[in-house]
Amino acid sequence: MTEVDYKPTVAYLGPEASFTHVAAKILFGSEGLVPQPTIPDCIEAVTAGHVAYAVVPLENALEGSVPMTIDYLFHGSELFINAEISTPIEQHLMVNERRKEDWNKIESVHSHPHALAQCHKYLQYHYRRTPLMQTTSTAAAAKYVSENPELNIAAIGNRLAAEKYGLHIAEENIHDFHFNHTRFVVLSLRKGNLDVQGQSETPKTTLMVKLPEDDRSGMLHQILSVFAWRRLNLSKIESRPMKTGLGNYFFIIDVLENESDPMMKGALEELAALNCTVRSFGTYYTFEQRPSR
Ligand SMILES: O=C(O)C(=O)C[C@]1(C(=O)O)C=C[C@@H](O)C=C1
């Protein structure tokens, strides 16, 4: 059992049977999960205290960061990361049961932009001239296809969505690369790890680092040395626009150490001495879901 042993309310990017729903169920079980139409709605629900946690996608192995999550989490939110879960992602092409005989003549393909991008080669090869329509989640696309049997359209999503919305899987595993995983994070107003059975033993701390206003040469090098000489292992560094002007970026840095570790404390103090603004999203652990076969 991976589920936490009490039942908080949890917002997730819905509707039911999205990949985020699957991830939320693995961590929290089926009770208390509250679907939200968009990622900002999930973040707002937990910020306003309507739910205890939110589960949102953060990064995909093929497509990189989920911009919507990054934008709302790192630009002014008051939330912390309490856990992360990485799950395998398998994408299938699905059509309405009433359309299963003529699915190879579909007139548009609907899905979340990340899912469409994960199947880019497949779509380029088989549906080069077919319009691709973006939806807020893969499950939203599946629901739309099920509610519109008069349209000859397809959705891309997971097997659970096909079952939930009564769709026929026309083609299985259409994602372009076998290793397709997404990292989802659990967010709340409180700092601290959410205890999930089977989590990794390596702590991870996510930092947002803003450089000082004066543009000094070698600044990024200095920041990296803060971690390097302390032998603090980084698992990710990403630059994101500050949205204040061209060339203004901040960094999201994942460090594989607990923020209470003396070396980490020293690193944070040194970053402050370098005039960097640092916000810690807390220390948490990862749960890795293994592929089913
Ligand atoms: O659309 C969904 O089902 C989601 O949960 C979102 C999302 C994403 O944002 O990347 C999650 C996992 C997959 O990578 C595709 C889509």
Image: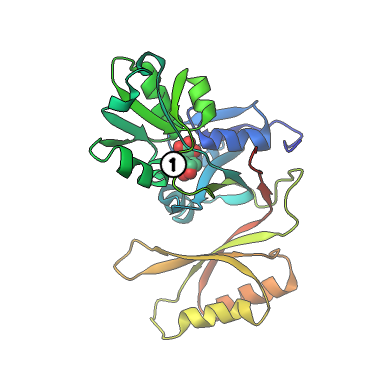
Which element type, helix, strand or loop, lies under badge 1?
A: helix
Image quarter hosting the N terminus? top right
Position of residue 259 relative to residue 161, above or below, is: below
Q: Is residue 142 left or right of residue 185?
A: left
Work out whether residue 144 can be spotted.
yes
Q: Quadrant of residue 34?
A: top right
Q: Quadrant of residue 245?
A: bottom left
> Tag 1: Cα neighbours inside 10 Å, few (<14), some, or many (≥20)?
some
Q: What is the number of callouts on the image? A: 1
Q: Is residue 157 left or right of residue 234?
A: left
Position of residue 260 relative to residue 167, above or below, is: below
Image x and y of residue 200, in percent? 73, 53
Specify the amino acid type for callout 1: Pro
Q: Nearer the viewer, residue 119 or 63?
A: 119
At x 66%, y 44%, the residue is 290
At x 55%, y 33%, the residue is 21
Image quarter hosting the C terminus? top right
Q: Is residue 233 left or right of residue 34?
A: right
Q: Quadrant of residue 110?
A: top left
Residue found at the far bottom of this picture: 217
Image x and y of residue 248, in percent? 36, 69
Residue found at the far left of this picture: 129
Q: Nearer the viewer, residue 36 or 94?
A: 94
At x 32%, y 27%, the residue is 104
Which residue has dot 1 on it? 40
Q: Is residue 293 left or right of residue 144?
A: right
Image x and y of residue 150, in percent? 29, 14
Position of residue 15 relative to residue 4, above or below, is: above
Image x and y of residue 2, in percent? 73, 38
